[in-house]
Amino acid sequence: MYGGGNTFEGIKPDEHTGEDPIQLAEFEARIDRGEKIEPSDWMPKLYRKQLIRMIEQHAHSEIIGALPEGTWITRAPGFKRKMALMAKVQDEVGHGQLLYSAAETLGKSREEMIDDLINGRSKYSNIFNYPTFTWADCCFISWLVDAGAIVNQLANAKGSYGPYCRALDRICAEESFHLKYGHHCVIYLASGTQKQRDMFQEALNRWWPPMMHFFGPSDKISVHTEILMKWKVKMGSNDDMRNQFLDMYVPKIWELGFTIPDPNLKKDTETGRWMYTEPDWEEFKRVINGDGPCNKERLEVRRIAEERGRWVREALRTPKTAYLTPLA
Amino acid sequence: MKSLDPRVNRLPQTGSANTTPKVPLDQFGTFQVFVQPKANKPFQHEGIVHAPNLEMAYVLAKEAFTRRFTCVSIYVAETRNIHVSVLTEGDDDAYDHVSEAAQEGKKASYEIFHMFKRGKQHQHVGTVEATNPNEALWLASKQLRTEKQVFNIWAIRTSDIRFTNQEDLDLWLTLPEKKFRDAAAYKGGEKLKTFLDASKK
């Protein structure tokens, strides 16, 4: 799973100028040919900076995203669901590690990234700042948040940076069961008792607004996003991703007889685009800046884990190994 | 902190509101992990792990990279023990940048890996007997180079690698039995169909 709609840092007007024109031309030609950029290649400073930011946010989202689902492992209905959810959460944490490694090849160490997460300097996907009240909330995440993540990840896997693409290929392959598992859970709730149906409908009502936020605010095309698209850092606009998600999953939700809490949601048959009530971007900003229902808890749990694990890391540490930036 | 999750509420309070930044030493070494997907397939590079030593790296690599897909064996090597050639592009072959190297020191065997395509993982292609890493690359250009273009070459001294012990090869035998990690185990179609048919009535 993954926090889509990356918030790219505002680019200062002069930030992508001042690079050596010959090296820049070679770099851009390589991307145009569809070749991947590898860690030892020359790259513009801005490319490196935005990639670190994006991959790091993705890694944090995997780690923090394990919390709202992980909390349901002990209470999952039945042994099979427990096994599956445990395997899924384990995968998410593994994906976090793969992504930290990919970001590290660009020169920021994993420990610096963890520091920045705990101290609130790095972001993660906003959707994980909401609580999972019932088992149905957990099923919503497994099915639909993962579905949104896969839309994003499949697009990003065609990006230009080799190590990130390789990590994403592996992640997408591992996630194929997450989505099927999530859908399976929801089918069982839908075809169950009235109480079970109500439970999922309520979860859907709670999660729909953050799900629409998930892909990020509508991006106005500017010179800055253009350059990130040209360098294949950003692979599609937030609106395109949101539209693709709605296209694939709204019919599946309706098929199960659930109602999506947006009276304006419908597909424009002429343009093929979905129309919907504009999500509340003020709330999105408020939550992303720390004022959501679970922001404090998520970071606090991560911080306590860090402190409680310190003695283990210290006991294992030895001067015989040296930290080296990973190769690929 | 008041959470919906009773386990979170039970966590001990650790006191400090801010975690002090990690000291620079709180940083494990990095290790490269190689996995052999099938008995007749070559080992290929899969990714990295952080670990305090080779043995722990092996254990962590097993968790991170062989939890899901069937494989027959893995090995790990510390990043600093990997000798790397130049990375080329276009139709430039990495072997064209390898020059003859003199014999210096004792002979040892080196494992050689090729990157056949930019963006793809390195693959194991063979072993050479050399006295140093530069000579290993030179010998590889004589013995292991084929018509297929190579963009990057790695050489690792065989004795720097932590291999899987013969008696541990059964570690991965049970992987195919873990069906709950398999998308095919979640067939909801039948249930969905019954549900849809019933709601039509």
Image: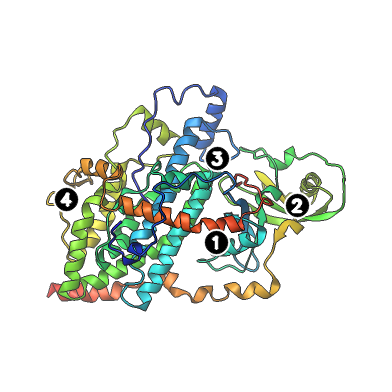
User: To which residue does mark 4 refer?
Assistant: A266
- Please identify the quadrant where the N terminus of chain A is shown: bottom left
Judge if badges 4 and 3 mark residues of a common chain. Answer: yes
Image coordinates for residue A175, horizontal then vertical, percent: 42, 61
Instruction: Give me the residue at 23% from left, 56% from top.
Output: A207
The residues tagged by marks 1 and 4 sit, at their Cα atoms, a distance apart of 43 Å
Q: What secondary structure is marked by label 2?
A: loop
The chain ID associated with circle 4 is A
The residues tagged by marks 3 and 2 sit, at their Cα atoms, a distance apart of 33 Å
Could you tell me if residue B95 is visible in this image? yes
Image coordinates for residue B18, horizontal then vertical, percent: 41, 46
Image coordinates for residue A11, horizontal then vertical, percent: 39, 29
Q: Name the mark nearer the viewer: 3 or 2.
A: 3
User: To which residue does mark 3 refer?
Assistant: A107
Relative to A321, is A197 on the left or the right? left
Q: Name the mark nearer the viewer: 1 or 3.
A: 3
Instruction: Give me the residue at 64% from left, 73% from top.
Output: B169
Task: Specify the amino acid type for callout 2.
Answer: Leu
Judge if badges 1 and 3 mark residues of a common chain. Answer: no
The residues tagged by marks 1 and 3 sit, at their Cα atoms, a distance apart of 23 Å
Residue B65: assigned label: 1
Q: Neighbour class for label 1 at 10 Å: few (<14), some, many (≥20)?
A: many
Instruction: Give me the residue at 82% from left, 55% from top.
Output: B108
Relative to A215, is A121 on the left or the right? right
Relative to A263, is A121 on the left or the right? right
The chain ID associated with circle 2 is B
Could you tell me if residue A1 is visible in this image? no
Task: Specify the amino acid type for callout 4.
Answer: Lys
The residues tagged by marks 1 and 2 sit, at their Cα atoms, a distance apart of 28 Å
Mark 1 / mark 2, whichever is N-terminal = 1
Residue B144: assigned label: 2
